[in-house]
């Protein structure tokens, strides 16, 4: 088969890397791809949001299957366009992608399906939102309804900050029409986890859960980023919790989407907050997580192409996913300044040293390749994933690999995995009655 992956970050590198292992896949393309992806796939210089160009390319190259990575083309309806042209594609329709495209729609679905989530109220006027905030305690969360590149949720620890966020979104229009409406949402304490489930519209199958690290600095300090690291499986989602999330959240939502006339096909990413063993939904995404995918896919033994075909053909009930009994841990190496302004085009040294390392993969998030040399080309540059028998072991391997890599002003978190280790220690102490 000829397969086109749409997107050009670390998530797409992991997808391409895994699809490349499938005997069903004869040729891989990635649009636009990146420096690292070009080792496995032919990179095509078409942006992920250029639906018409991607369609024309797929027709011309007789692409057999398309996998869509990012949310922007999914929410714009790329799946509907490919399906109309009889090109098989992995991802939800535009109507189903509303679960990510509109946080208010997602809340309406959750309320109808009785799914646990934070209490919220919708506002279009900043005066009314501010009047409401005057009656509420802090912390409190302000969210733009639409897509805002991961920046649309503001957790405010003072009322002043909350009011400032309301004004920025509704009056200053910092997110454009994505901020036509806002949600003021109850703050949920707890531990976050990212849970993923595949759905073919009829059958739902969970993937291993992962934990992301959104803040830029160690111990969850500093501004939010796209994600600075992940590990999988996340001990906070043990098999009992996974079963609860499937029963209380994923299955009712998938059934409700069918009732809404928008059956869900693809991967559903459930952002969870877990406190006292009670999972609540923070958000839905209609795609794989980044960098979670870079920690999940290296553990999957099943052929990913078979999985995507099963979703497309609604035969997910015939697939049994097999996983390596290991832990994967991913550390993001970022450009100096990220998540703010940063330079591009800095030469990366030491990547070839990783080729000889067992159970370590360098997924490229933002690189370019010229004359065999890799250069930085984004905020998040590399995702170093290591597999290990335990979290500690995977952590040691990942950080040992990072010691071999260097680019000017590179920065990364040094505590990826610590939360899982602390949790495991707590659980061990509790069961020993300490
Ligand atoms: P979202 O874009 O909805 O995932 O929000 C981004 C981040 O904000 C999440 O990963 C959480 O860390 C935080 N967050 C969002 N909603 C809430 C909430 N209701 N309570 C506490 N933290 C939240
Ligand atoms: N890692 C969070 C996301 O993919 O949105």
Image: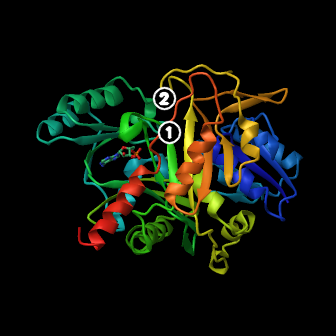
The numbered dot on residue 207 is none
Residue at position x 61%, y 57% in the image = 387
Report whether the residue tagged 1 is closer than 8 Å to ligand 2. yes
Nearest to N terminus: mark 1 or mark 2: 1
Circle 2 SS class: loop
Residue 345, quarter of the rendered image? top right
Q: Residue 65 location, x and y as percent?
A: 77, 57
Which quadrant, please, contains the C terminus?
bottom left
**Can residue 30 be seen from the camera position used here?**
yes
Residue at position x 75%, y 42% in the image = 37
Above or below residue 337? Residue 62 is: below
Above or below residue 326? Residue 103 is: above
In this figure, which residue is indicated by the disc labeled 1? 226
Pick whichever, 188 or 261, lies toward us.
188
**Can residue 96 be seen from the camera position used here?**
no
In this figure, which residue is indicated by the disc labeled 2? 339
Residue at position x 62%, y 79% in the image = 317
- Neighbour tally class for label 2: few under 14, some 14-19, many 20 plus, Cα within 10 Å: some
Q: Residue 91 location, x and y as percent?
A: 63, 57
């Amino acid at each position: 088969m000829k397969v086109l992956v749409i997107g050009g970050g670390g998530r797409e590198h992991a997808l391409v890397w895994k699809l490349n292992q499938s005997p069903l896949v004869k040729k891989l393309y990635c649009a636009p791809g990146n420096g690292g992806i070009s080792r496995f796939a032919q990179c095509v210089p078409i942006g992920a949001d250029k639906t018409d160009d991607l369609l024309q390319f797929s027709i011309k190259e007789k692409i057999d299957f398309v996998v869509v990575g990012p949310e922007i083309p999914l929410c714009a309806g790329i799946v509907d366009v490919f399906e109309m042209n009889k090109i098989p594609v992995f991802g939800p329709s535009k109507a189903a992608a509303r679960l990510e495209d509109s946080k208010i729609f997602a809340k309406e679905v959750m309320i109808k399906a009785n799914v646990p989530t934070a209490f919220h109220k919708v506002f279009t006027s900043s005066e009314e939102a501010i009047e409401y905030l005057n009656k509420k305690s802090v912390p409190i969360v302000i969210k733009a309804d639409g897509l805002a590149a991961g920046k649309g949720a503001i957790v405010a620890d003072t009322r002043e900050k909350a009011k400032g966020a309301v004004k920025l979104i509704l009056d200053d229009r910092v997110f454009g029409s994505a901020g036509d409406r806002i949600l003021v949402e109850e703050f949920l304490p707890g531990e976050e986890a990212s849970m993923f489930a595949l759905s073919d519209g009829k059958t739902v199958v969970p993937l291993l859960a992962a934990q992301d690290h959104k803040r830029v600095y160690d111990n969850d300090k500093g501004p939010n980023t796209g994600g600075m690291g992940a590990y999988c499986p996340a001990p906070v989602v043990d098999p009992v919790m996974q079963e609860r999330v499937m029963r209380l959240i994923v299955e009712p939502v998938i059934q409700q989407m069918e009732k809404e006339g928008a059956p869900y096909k693809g991967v559903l990413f459930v952002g969870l907050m877990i406190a006292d063993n009670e999972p609540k939904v923070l958000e839905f995404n209609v795609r794989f997580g980044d960098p979670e995918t870079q920690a999940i896919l290296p553990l999957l033994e099943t052929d990913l192409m078979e999985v995507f075909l099963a979703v497309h053909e609604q035969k997910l009930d015939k697939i049994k996913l097999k996983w390596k009994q290991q832990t994967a841990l991913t550390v993001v190496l970022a450009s100096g300044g990220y998540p703010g302004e940063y330079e591009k085009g800095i030469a990366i040294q030491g990547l070839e040293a990783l080729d000889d390392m067992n159970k370590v993969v360098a997924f490229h998030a933002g690189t370019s390749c010229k004359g065999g040399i890799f250069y930085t080309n984004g905020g998040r540059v590399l995702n170093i994933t290591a597999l290990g028998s335990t979290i500690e072991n995977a952590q040691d391997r990942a950080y040992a690999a990072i010691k071999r890599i260097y680019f000017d002003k590179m920065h990364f978190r040094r505590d990826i995995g610590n939360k899982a280790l602390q949790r495991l220690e707590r659980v061990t102490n509790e069961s020993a009655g300490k």
